[in-house]
Amino acid sequence: MSKSILIDKGIILKNGEICKDKINLVSGAITQPFAEMVWASTGGDKETINRFTDILVTMNNDTERDRLFNIIQMCYGLMGVMFSDEAACMNENSAVLKYFIFSFIADFGEIMQEYLSEKFNKDNTAMSN
């Protein structure tokens, strides 16, 4: 893939800037089903989810970001979740990849916090009845 494909997809603007709004849209669209599968496959285990999130955050650095992207793609395949064509090209540009991974981790963390809060509230409601 080339930079022109990123331009064609609206991920990089014609002036060379990355389009953060487009990256956020792509990230948001693929993160929700992924987070649902992580939640389901871990049974909502907070410790496992926190370890997984820690790996995502720790590997989000200049030397491991490409590997992290590949691991995320592999996890999608293992869980049977679609990794979109738009997301698949995010590693073609380092600035795009950096922002995509940042957005993905932020989205994933927010979703997991919502799930954990719902579980906590549900557990507390059940205990009080």
Image: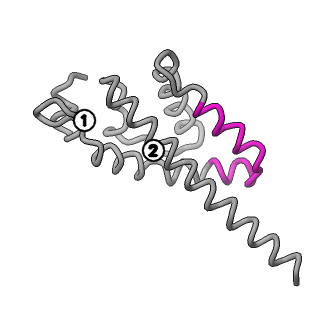
Q: Nearer the viewer, residue 59 or 48?
A: 59
* Left or right: 99 in relation to 38: left
* Left or right: 95 in relation to 67: left
Residue found farthest to the left: 14
> What amino acid type is highlighted by mark number 2?
Met
| Image point (52%, 19%), residue name | 64
Across and down, in percent, residue 99 comes to: 38, 35
| Image point (63%, 39%), residue name | 53
**Residues shaded magenta:** 38-57
- Split into 4 quadrants, where in the image is the N terminus? top left
> What amino acid type is highlighted by mark number 1?
Ile
Which mark identifies residue 125? none
| Vertical arrangement, residue 107 with respect to residue 19, above or below | below
Across and down, in percent, residue 95 comes to: 32, 27
- Magenta segment's dominant SS is helix
Say which quarter of the image contains residue 57: top right
| Image point (30%, 24%), residue name | 93
Q: Which residue is mark 1?
A: 18
